[in-house]
Image (cartoon, grey):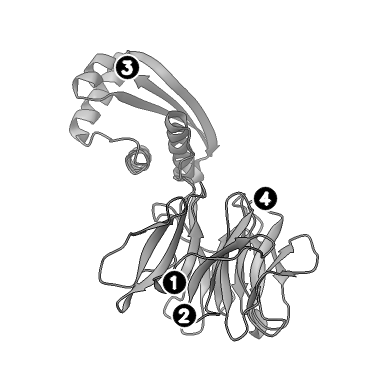
């Protein structure tokens, strides 16, 4: 267990992009044993192997609970610069380590880490006509099936607090938007207007939902309060489809996909539907839009030749960078919270 926890913490810190973890495990193990034998931390020995920071974690187990006590040392100045205690269930030790890694990242960068985050996705398990929503840790561990409806469940979207997932469900035959509380498993139907109810996107304050509806004859973007109220129509797409809404981090704008003027393209508009602007000019079949947490970038999918690739648009200078170049299809980009 301790080796696994150490491995998880090393992975989290190494993959944060802010730290370079020393990989000489034999030397690290030897120095760790020497510290234990001496009953103290020999900062000079750790500094001698080229380390600038030293992370020490003590794990104390009591029944089904564990407590992690972390100390970080500045080896150049020979002093302790950070301490943190995290407690929880032993069965959730991976999650506790992820939380500790995020606390370390935030302490040194001011930015929240992503180690304790999860990824929601859809998988069909090879069964035609049946798709379910799954959750997995950011590192690919702890795969959990969320829905068990034996129908098509797609387009999962987290609430801002991460406690709820909204998704499109074909339960009882037609697409509706459903929410599921990840702690209790309680589900509620959020939108079930006649026709299509799809592509849920929750506002940053958690009070509103942007979605695609076809109740008025065409598939368009609407906005409505989650505590009730009439949907407000934001787009009009005669002969076309408007879908995949995505809120800006400040909640003032909504990016979306529309093929009202030909092939699918990325647009942005004010939250009231005004001031629509075409963002993906020059790109073929642009879809699957996502807004970066800082609001300065938009990721999307577009065709390059016969294949779909991922691109990032810098909203400040309107420059577009192609992120994927492997000769295969890539789709549905999603920014991490950092």
Say which residue label 2 marks: 263
Q: CA distance from mark 4 to mark 2?
A: 32 Å
Q: CA distance from mark 3 to mark 4?
A: 45 Å
Q: x, y (%) of residue 273? A: 66, 65
**Is residue 233 among the parts visible in the rendering?**
yes
Disc number lying in front (4 or 2): 2
User: Residue 41, labelled with which disc?
Assistant: 3
Image height of 111 relative to 184, above or below: above
Residue at 61% x, 51% y: name it: 160
Q: Is residue 102 left or right of residue 75?
A: right
The tag earlier along the polypeptide, 4 or 2, is: 4
Disc number lying in front (3 or 1): 1
Asked whether 12 or 280 is in front, the reply is 280
Disc number lying in front (3 or 2): 2
Asked whether 282 or 164 is in front, the reply is 282
User: Residue 138, labelled with which disc?
Assistant: none
Q: Secondary structure at mark 3?
A: loop
């Amino acid at each position: 267990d301790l080796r696994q926890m150490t491995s998880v913490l090393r992975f989290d810190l190494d993959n944060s992009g802010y730290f370079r973890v020393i990989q000489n495990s034999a030397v690290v193990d030897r120095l760790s044993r020497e510290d234990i034998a001496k009953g103290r931390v020999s900062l000079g020995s750790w500094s001698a192997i080229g380390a600038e920071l030293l992370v020490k974690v003590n794990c104390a187990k009591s029944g089904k609970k564990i407590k992690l006590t972390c100390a970080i040392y500045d080896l150049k100045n020979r002093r302790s610069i950070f301490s943190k205690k995290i407690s929880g269930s032993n069965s959730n030790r991976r999650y506790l380590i992820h939380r500790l890694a995020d606390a370390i990242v935030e302490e040194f960068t001011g930015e929240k880490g992503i180690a304790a985050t999860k990824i929601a996705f859809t998988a069909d398990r090879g069964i035609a006509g049946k798709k379910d929503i799954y959750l997995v840790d950011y590192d690919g561990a702890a795969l959990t099936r969320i829905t068990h409806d034996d129908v098509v469940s797609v387009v999962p979207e987290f609430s801002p607090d991460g406690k709820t997932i909204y998704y499109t469900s074909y339960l009882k035959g037609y697409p509706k938007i459903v929410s599921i509380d990840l702690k209790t498993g309680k589900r509620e139907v959020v939108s079930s207007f006649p026709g299509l109810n799809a592509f849920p996107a929750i506002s940053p304050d958690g009070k509103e939902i942007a979605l695609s509806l076809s109740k008025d004859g065409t598939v368009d973007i609407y906005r409505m309060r989650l505590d009730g109220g009439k949907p407000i129509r934001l787009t009009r797409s005669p002969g076309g489809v408007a879908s995949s809404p995505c809120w800006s981090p400040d909640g003032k704008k909504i990016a979306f996909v529309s093929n009202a003027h030909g092939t699918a393209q990325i647009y942005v508009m004010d939250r009231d539907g005004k001031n629509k602007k075409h963002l993906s000019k020059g790109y073929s079949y642009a879809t699957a839009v996502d807004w970066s947490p800082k609001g300065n970038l938009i990721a999307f999918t577009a065709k390059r030749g016969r294949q779909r690739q991922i691109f990032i648009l810098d909203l400040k200078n309107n420059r577009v960078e192609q992120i994927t170049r492997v000769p295969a299809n890539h789709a549905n980009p999603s920014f991490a919270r950092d």
